[in-house]
Structures are given as structure tokens and as C-alpha cells.
Image (spheres, grey):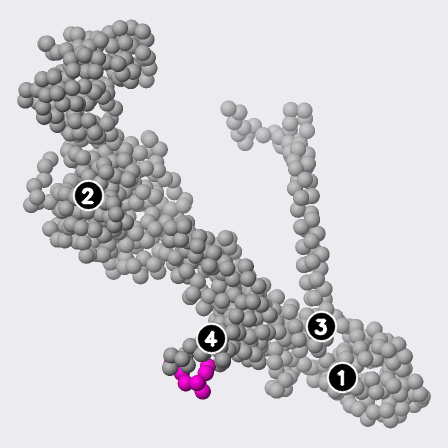
Amino acid sequence: MSVSHNDAYVAFEHVQKSYDGVSLVVKDLNLNIGKGEFLTMLGPSGSGKTTCLMMLAGFETATNGEIKLDGRPINQVPPHKRGIGMVFQNYALFPHMTVGENLSFPLEVRGMGKSEREAKVKRALDMVQMYDFINRRPAQLSGGQQQRIALARALVFDPSLVLMDEPLGALDKQLREHMQFEIKHLHESLGITVVYVTHDQGEALTMSDRIAVFNDGRIQQLAPPADLYERPDNSFVAGFIGENNKLPGIIEELSGDKALVRLATGEVIDATAVNVTQKGQKTLVSIRPERVEFKPEMMPEGAHMIGADVLEVIYMGDILRAVLRVAGSDDFVMKMRNTQGQTRLTPGQKIRVGWHPQDARALEPM
Amino acid sequence: MADITASEIPAGGLVTSDGRPLKTALADAQARAKRRAFLLVAPLLVFVVVTFIVPIGQMMHQSIYNDGFSANMPRITAWFAENPIGTEPDETAFEALALDVRDSAAAKTIGVVGTRVNYEMSGTRSLFTSTGRKAKDFSEPYHEALRAADAKWDNPELWATMRQVSRAYSPNFFLAALDLTRDTQGNIVRVPEERQVYVNLFIKTFGLGLLITFTCFLLGFPIAHLLAILPLRWSNLLMILVLLPFWTSLLVRTTSWMVLLQQQGVLNSLLVWSGIIGDDGRIQMIYNQTGTIIAMTHILLPFMILPLYSVMRPIPPSYVRAARSLGATSWTAFRRVYLPQTLPGIGAGSLLVFILAVGYYITPALVGGASGQLISNLIAFHMQDSLNWSLAAALAALLLAAVLVLYWLYDRLVGIDNLKLG
């Protein structure tokens, strides 16, 4: 899903942010978010993603550049006039108010009448199946329940844009996965625009329409989840999203996007050139562990295979994970599905591994 | 897992594997630990009882008990007990009185007796001492003898007073502390207006206490907030400044206020120098109520700031942010979200400052002048100068009771478990 500049609902234009006047936390951010889109800002801590969200919410001011909401510059608009719903990392439910009072707070400050308020609160609580808890205090609720209330509170005043700052960070794995679907479902049924910040790549891949991977104050790649996972633009994205094997080498041949890479040990492998431009250039080839094959019949005609020593095989239930020595590096990982007829490797075994050229991506080393 | 459901519990309660009841076994097993815990707190317990509970009990007793008259005047005390109120003193009564005065004068306790009566009726101490000097020559008829010694012995008001003080236990000191007294018939009436001191002083003490609490709150709230939101490095520095007054002597602090505020002091001189006031218009800022308020606000400010700070520090900024994102102006966010969460700190700080303020003694004594004196200064006066310890005790007991009532009210309104002192 690509969004042209014109129909951008939220637009960051050359936004820069500095806290100390010495270094930039956000360096020249340009980002357009379409109406109804679920966009995730993903990145390690300190990468500037939360700062971007806070600038959008109005709690931080952009040092330079402009942020537009629905075509209107909002740099000078105070947070309470932006009409943006927000879910906070620690939920930020007001501890001295009941669930019902928490939800009617945004309606009260908008001067809404009592009956209308009650109807909206009921609708929002029904939406997250929490109406029975209307008279409880936040402290009497579990983490997951608080999360739902926080979600309902951010939605109760019908904002068209909702920001979420690592909202599931405090929940356990099972609940987190459940809530991911619930948020996704709400997003689809309400047609709202969601900007979601997380450092959990699994969460980002599951929920988003597009993901903006942040590092060092810049967007490294902005793409739908499948593109991001399968076709990372650079070695940071390749390393940050999912598990990746990295083989250093030198470009031997280059024609179009097809490249032959000579590894340090002299072996030659096939790869797809991503951001390498000339022969003789140093490169880092990245291959997903689940795309590594060791059965010659699974390989395309003429593809190169290289020798590997099995160091360790770990049984993980749904998959088998083999650690191999490939081209001198001891941490090459191969994942095999644990199917009925799967070949069981044993440590010490010598095998040959290969991959489809489009699964190996020759990237410029960082 | 050994789940024991209610149906499995035998009728006589659970027993251990060797047949002892579980409750007894548990008590035995924990007895040693309990004994050790008690022994550890025992020194403190003894200390508190000896230095706190007992003196307060004694003070309370003193406020209703004074045997200065009854212990030294046994005969007339007995006569009062036998004859109901309103009985005209007859020759028996005068005989008892004369003999008591004689014996008391011989035992050199007539001064104590006179002082006790004098508390209730001024000008009577000299009557007792002067009569005491003549008493060894008294002979029948005693009425005549006493009248000859001093005509005041026929005064019915004196007899009514003596009847009252003949009872060692009496609420009279509390009456006096509330500006009340008894007339000759024993009815409780207000003392004449020019002698009404204590009720007004109580009102003034509580009024000033409230005012000081309020100024402490006004000044302390922003500072506590600043302390709570500053980075730790800066807030530690600011905290030292807040605590600095704690580390300097109370006298030094009070004296520096004198230097700053007096008419020839720093502040007045600055105002004159800058032309805001003329040299003849120097403001009286100390040795009056204003001085008491300024100095006590300064001294009690940390007691407001610390509980507020301890409540504000853990409030994450995301609450106010959430309120703002939900559409509240910064004022609404403060009033509806931030302020209610600081209530336990406000309550604790206010209670602490108010209780300390109404009992404060040194500062009003030094900088209060005539108009800035509080009830504790009068208690001290009765302890040290007038030596009417019973009245001092009654005043102190009333102060204590007022504070306890306040504490109870706070518990009812806010809840004592909502109190956060640090």
C-alpha cells in the first residue's frame, strides 16, 4: 500500500528534533500516513520512534520541519486541541477514577451531556467487552483488562487518529498475542488511522499495513511487513527484523540484480544485489535460516551449494534448528520444519547447503 | 498437590500428624519468634511509656486534681462535705476554719492554700497569709476572732470559693481555661469580659495555624512539584536547600528573621533605599502577628514539602499527558488528574504543619511580640511564672483534645490510610 503525498492524512515533512541543541534525535523525517492505515514505527530504544510519536501527539515540539494532520499544520496546536487518541505504555488510567469516570473524562471536558456520555461510554466498553467493570478502579483490574480500558478510553471520543506507544509491552506473551488481534480487529471495524510504536518486530509484522523501521533518528525502510521481512533494503533492517545469517564476501560478478559473491574461504554463492553497485565491492550476504536448503532436489538448476559442518541440532518442537559451520563462521543457522519424513541431522555430519538466489541478499555492510 | 477442601476438615479442626490441634502447634511454633520480636521492641515501649504516656497521664490528672486546699485544711473540708451548698457558715464552720488556718500556718503550708483559693478568686492569698500570722492567738468565739483578723472572712463569695476548692477533684481548671467560672450558687457563668483570655487565644491560635498551613501549602506545592519533575541531579541539590533549615538551629533561623524583618533591618532598609517607602514609613514586620506568620511558615515549610514530594515523585508524567491527549486543557488536567492524586500528601503535610503550628512555642515567644503570642506561650506562662500548673495542664489538655478531634475528623473525611508522610 503506497500513499501519495496528496492523500496523506498525517505528514511529517523534514522534521528534525534535538533535545540538547548538540545532537539530533530525529534527523530529517519524511513520512506520509494514509487515512485508515495501520502504520508501525519499529526500532530499538533510542532510535527516535517514540519522539516522533510524542511530536505527533503534541508533547514534544519539532525543532525544525512541519507536521500536518489532514493537511493542516499542527506544530502550534496544543495537544488537547489535536483530537488524537493515545494509548500509553503504562496505560495511564487515572487511579482515582473508576473505569466509567475514566472513559467519560474526555467527553466531560468536551462539554457533552450526561445521557450522551453514558451512551458513548457504554458503547466503548462494550467494544472491548468490559462493560461489567464500569464501577471498578483501575487498580482492581488485571494488566490485560487495564489495557482494554485504556484502548476504550482512547477511542471513546471518536478520534480518527489513534497513537499507541508500546501498549502491549507490559503483558505476557499469550495475552499480548490475543490483544494484537483485538487491536487489529478494532482498527479494521472502526476505520481509524493507527500509528503504533513498538520494539517488538513480531508485533509489528502481525499488525501493520506498513512498518517504518527506525534507527539512529532515520527511517531505514518503510514497507509492508512481507517486503520488509523478505526484501530488507539494508543490513540494519536485515539484522533487526527476524533472524538472519550473514556471510561477508566480495562481489565477483554483477549483472542487473544478480550477483556472484566470493566468500572469505574462496567459495562462490548466488545472491540478489540490493545496494551494491560494482564488482570488487565488499558485501554482506543475508539469508533467512528457514530459506536455507540442504537437499539438492529442492534447489533450482545451476545454483551453487557450499559445504557445511553440522555443529549442533536443537529440537524446538515445531522446528529443528541446526547450527552449522559455513565458510569459516560457526553461527550459521538453518531451520527445518519438523515433519514426518524430515531428515534428522546429527552433529559432526558434513552436508552441502544452498538457497534460491532471491533469498540471499547482497547488502552494503554497515 | 495436596488440596484440602472444606469437606475434608474434621469436626474438631485440623490436627498435626502426631495428633496435636493445628492451632496449638502453630502458636507453639511461632511463640519463640513472637517473644524475640517483643523483646526487640520492649526498650522502645518502655521508653515511650515512661517519657510519653506517663507524663501525659500526669498532666491530664493535674488538670482536674489539685489538693492544695483539701490536704492542708482537713476540718473545713469535712464541714463542706457534711453541709450542703447554700448553708450559712455557723460557729462550727468558723472553728474548723480557724483551727485549719492555725495548723496550716504552723506547718508553713498556708501559702499553698492561699494560692489555691487565689486561682479562683484573686486577692485572697494575702488574706490567708496575714490571717495565718495571727492564727496562733485565736480563741473562741472563732467567728469573732476571724472577723477581727479580717472582715473579708464574712464574704459569702469567699465561702463559695472555698467550698469549690475544698474538693481536690474538680473541673474548675477546665472552666477557667474556657473563660468560665462559678457564681456563689455554683452555677457556671462566663467570666467578666475584661478577663476573657483563653477562648479568644485558642481561636487565634487555630486561625493562625490555618493561615500558616495555607501559606505553607501555597509556597510548598510548586516547590514539591519542581522537586518531583527535575532530573535527579538538580532535584537533589534543591532538596538540600529545602532541608537546610532543618540542619540549622531554630534559634539561629529565628534570629536571622529578626535581622531581616525588624524596622531597622535589611528588608526595610532595602525598601527605603529603593524609594518604595519613606524613612518614616518603615513597616513593622516583626514582634507582631506578621512576624509569627512569616517565621513559622519558613520553619514549617519542609514539613509540607516532604510529604508532597513523596506523593508527587511516583506520579508518572503520562497521567497529565493522557488527560491532555483526551482533550483537557492544562488547568483541567491539573485540577482533575494531578491534584487529586496529590491529596494524600496535601492531607499529611497540612495535618503535620497545623498540629506543629498550634503547639509552637519558641518562635512566637521570640518574634511574636504582644499580638503574635499563641496558646502555648500562655501555657508556658502558667508553668513558669504564675505556677498555676493545673490551669496550664487544663489548657494543654484542651489543645491535645482539639488536635485529636482534628485527627479524627481527618480520618472520617479523608481516611488515615490516605496519609503519606514520606
Q: Is residue B152 left or right of residue A273?
A: right
Q: Is residue B281 magenta?
A: yes
Instruction: Please report, as a chain letter, where disc 1 is located.
Output: B
Could you say which disc has been placed on residue B44 in the image? none
Q: Which residue position is annotated with label 4?
A: B266
Q: Are marks 2 and 1 on the same chain?
A: no
Quarter residue B83 falls in: bottom right
User: Where is residue B411 shown, x and y percent of the image?
Assistant: 52, 59
**Within-10-Å neighbours for mark 3: few <14, some 14–19, many 20+:** many
Q: Which residue is mark 2?
A: A27
SS of the residue at dot 1?
helix
Figure quadrant of the C terminus of chain A: top left
Pointer 3: what residue?
B389
Residue found at the far left of this picture: A256
Write down the chain letter for disc 4: B
Which is more foreground, mark 2 or mark 3? 2
Instruction: Point out the tag, 3 or 1, that comes first from the N-terminus.
Output: 1
Chain part drawn in magenta: B276-283
Choose the circle earlier in sequence order: 4 or 3. 4
Query: Tag 3, which secondary structure?
Result: helix
At label 4, the amino acid type is Val
CB atoms of marks 1 and 4 within 8 Å = no
For the residues beneath circles 1 and 4, the answer to whether they share a chain is: yes
| Amino acid beneath label 2 | Lys
As helix, strand or loop, the secondary structure at mark 4 comes to helix
- Residue under circle 1? B160
Hey, what amino acid is under mark 3?
Trp
Disc 1 marks a residue whose amino acid type is Ala
Instruction: Name the residue located 82 percent from the left edge and 93 percent from the top edge.
Output: B151
Name the residue located 34 percent from the left edge and 59 percent from the top edge: B334
**Residues at marks 4 and 3, common chain?**
yes
